Amino acid sequence: MAFSSSSCLKCHPWCHPHSPLSSPHKPTSISIISFASTHHHHDPITSQSLPANFSAAQLLDNLRRQRDESSALRLFNWASKQPNFAPSLLVYEEILRKLGHVGSFASMRDILQEMKIAGCVPNRGTFLIFIETYGKFDLYDEVIGVIELMETEFDLKPDTHFYNYLLNVLVDGDKLKLVEAANSDMVSKGIKPDCSTFNILIKALCKAHQIRPAILLMEEMPSYGFLPDENTYTTIMQGYIEEGNLKGALRVREQMVEAGCPVTLVTVNVLVHGFCKEGRIEEALSFIEKMTNEGFFPDKLTFNTLVNGLCKAEHVKHALEVMDVMLQEGFDPDVYTYNSLISGLCKLGEVEEAVEILNQMVSRDCSPNTVTYNTIISKLCKENQVEEATELARVLTSNGILPDACTFNSLIQGLCLTSNHAAAMELFQEMKNKGCKPDEFTYNMLIDSFCIKGKLDEALRLLKEMETSGCARNVITYNTLINGLCKNKKIVEAEEIFDQMEIQGVSRNAVTYNSLIDGLCKSRKVEEAAQLMDQMIMEGLKPDKFTYNSLLTYFCRAGDITKAADIVQTMTSNGCEPDTVTYGTLIGGLCRAGRIDVASRLLRSIQMKGMVLTPHTYNPVIQALFRRKRTKEAMRLYREMMEKGDPPDAVTYKIIFRGLCNGGGPIGEAVDFMIEMTEKGFLPEFSSFYMLAEGLCALSMEETLVKLVEMVTKAENLSDEEVSMIRGFLKIRKYQDALATLGGILDRQKQNKYYR
């Protein structure tokens, strides 16, 4: 979406630095008193006894100061054993929280039994600590079990608030089946829901992408005596926005206004996020302007949402303007603000500007996090600036931020892209040594790098290491290996990996089949390839143009044009439209089989379909025409290609130059063509140039030869000494020696291959 000048920030008074709205609304500063400097940690001295007036409140205060659960537990146990002292419920709950923080569930249950023995009756809040802790450690099945524990062992019944807390933990953990089970349990026990219960269940339905049932549940609320509140409407709006349906969210807002439910800034921010998510920045700005006229003022979240939206829409300049306004409104940009800007600049390729923002961030006492550094490191690596990326990673470490898998992966990827494989493996080892576990992305990159280098044993060793380290092997891992093995003609090993996928339960995709089918075709195992295509169809995968083109290439090279034509026919009848590669391959096969006129007719018929033909399609026909000495037709087709098709490639120039130099036409045409191709940056293969030079000498056209040699020496950037030597031979009319010297130089430079 173009961000026109009409939608500039100046057009939105709420966002203008000198807006009348900017002065009356300043955020209130809150001072936070830190006790860190006054409190010190001491292990209890077990030989001492408690003072007579020592209270449970004092013990609670001391417990809260403990830095770890072990020292807290030692202090608790010591105090509990003192005569005339009984810990209070608050003390027990504090020790449960300390133990829960590190997931010490067995000790938590022991404390619960101690409470029972000591006669300290837990309440529902005590069991909520268990629910919170189980949720934190993803033990959601245990969450449900807490109800049974409190009912059977402590004769304590859950109430509406308890179930709401439990349901919310399950919803946040995306355990929607357990939500359903817990809600059914609540209903069966006759515990009445409240407005919060409905809101939590609506949130669960929205997370499950069931917007319609969520709306129906909202419509049921009045029959239970509850009216939907701001939370209800906003949750459904958020659900619509996540589905990419902003129109639906705006409809819900209208319902909210009609129902007389007050709209809060939370609602405004959700809708601003919706506009930004769809890239509708202008409308987001207009919406905020409208809301400010109704008495709302942007808060920090509003600004951050806008900055993020503008950056994603590649309007980073405007995002920087918003940040300036944000500062003038009294809101300090946070790590989210800066990360959005840095990400936006990196996407635009403006890494230096991103580094400037990073420096600005540090100067304003906003600490960068791993995401900040990783964004810049990743971009630097993709632009082959691996040294700069490594230096930034050192800065990250020196600032006390531990590099994560994303940091290492970016650097390893950068090293692999620059073919610095040894350094990539060293970094991989360092990653493991520093306790950062490599993921499938790490292994896939290194496996791919080994495959490109033909080091397949090393690639297979990494696959084995993935298995032993418990790292998931995905379809990309196996596809990379199969492709690498096929390209290195190790078909048997590729088939073994293919079979291994089934054993490991990894689903094969079209890429898996296409890689192996192509490898089998190139190894002349076409029957196996055909069987594999049948298996592909049985697994519910549709063969695509890559599948058919592999089989087509085999039959064309084998000279079996009938089979090749059948492949194209099958391809079309199965709804897979042939592309220029398909037609180019078939045309090439027809030309090799000597059926040039059929190939020419096919070329014309695909032109009639409106397809833009590539050199791959034209080249075989042009080459076949030259071989039959039909030079004029070949050159006419070349000129047509220049006008109607894609630009000629290096192979086109090689075919035509060789054809013209082989006596296929007047020598002047060959000279003119060489000048044309050289001006376009293509240099002839030396053998064809030598043939042309001999022709020029035979026709006493030495002056033309000298000019052409000069063109070649200039284009090849020969040294002054080399040019002087060649010119010396030309001056004394030793043309054969001049050409031999030029050929030798080009040979040494490994530039006598067909074309650069």
Image (cartoon, rainbow, N blue to C red):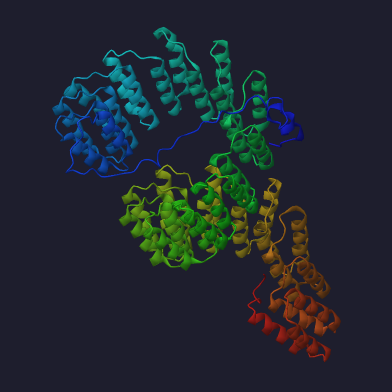
Quarter the N terminus occupies: top right
Height in image: 310 above or below 466? above
Quarter the C terminus occupies: bottom right
Return the residue found at the far front: 52
Q: Is residue 732 left or right of residue 372?
A: right
Height in image: 531 above or below 71? below
Height in image: 653 above or below 574? below
Q: How many marks?
A: 0
Front position in the image: 161 or 653: 161
Height in image: 136 above or below 672? above
Quadrant housing residue 573: top right
Front position in the image: 753 or 637: 753
Quadrant housing residue 194: top left
Residue visible at 39% across and 46% down in the picture? 507
Q: Position of residue 65 (x, y in %)?
A: 33, 38
Camera sees residue 523? no
Front position in the image: 532 or 629: 532
Camera sees residue 619? yes
Q: Position of residue 64 (x, y in %)?
A: 32, 36
Front position in the image: 314 or 262: 262
Residue visible at 79% across and 75% down in the picture? 711
Q: Position of residue 319 (x, y in %)?
A: 65, 39
Q: Is residue 57 left or right of residue 209?
A: left
